[in-house]
Image (cartoon, grey):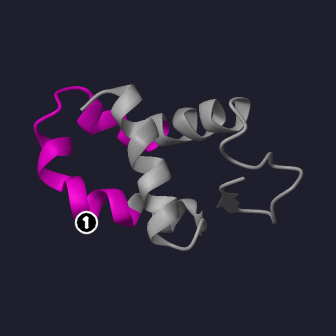
Amino acid sequence: MTRNKLIELVVEALKANGGKSTIVQVSKFIWDHYEQDLRESGDVFYTWQYEIRWAAKKLRDKGIMKSVELSKKGIWELS
């Protein structure tokens, strides 16, 4: 599991939830579908919840996710 893979998983989680989710929903989706990958990922296992926040920032920078100003508080949303 890498940081870049987590970017893909955030998008996957958002798509699975109709294009928008809370961070808790995104985290649950990733854990439910990729727990074993996370457990085998070395240090990422201890930082993955931080890393998905980094992934969200990258997705916002690329215009794939809406900016925090355009989404309701606490909601991550695809553009």
x 52%, y 61%: residue:
14
Q: Determine whether, in the image, residue 24 is placed left or right of residue 63.
A: left
- Taking depth in this image into account, of 4 and 72 the one nearest to the observer is 4
Q: State which region is magenta.
A: 28-50
Residue 16 vs 37, above or below: the answer is: below
In the picture, the quarter occupied by the N terminus is top left
Which type of secondary structure does the marked residue at label 1 adopt? helix
Using the rendered view, name the quadrant where residue 49 is placed.
Answer: top left
Q: Is residue 57 magenta?
A: no
Pinpoint residue 71: horizontal percent, then vertical percent.
Answer: 81, 60
Pinpoint residue 69: horizontal percent, then vertical percent.
Answer: 89, 50
x 33%, y 57%: residue:
30
Q: Residues within 10 Å of mark 1 (few under 14, many from 20)?
A: few
Q: Determine whether, in the image, residue 70 is placed left or right of residue 43.
A: right
Q: Is residue 42 magenta?
A: yes
Residue 48 vs 12, above or below: the answer is: above
Residue type, mark 1 in image: Asp
- Magenta span: predominant SS is helix
Pinpoint residue 67: horizontal percent, then vertical percent.
Answer: 80, 45
Q: Determine whether, in the image, residue 42 is placed left or right of residue 31.
A: left
Pinpoint residue 4: horizontal percent, then vertical percent.
Answer: 40, 27
Q: Determine whether, in the image, residue 12 is placed left or right of residue 37.
A: right
x 48%, y 41%: residue:
52
- Taking depth in this image into account, of 32 and 4 the one nearest to the observer is 4
x 70%, y 38%: residue:
60
The residue beneath circle 1 is 32
Using the rendered view, name the quadrant where residue 70 is placed.
Answer: bottom right
**Number of dots carrying numbers:** 1
Which residue is the extreme one toward the bottom?
18
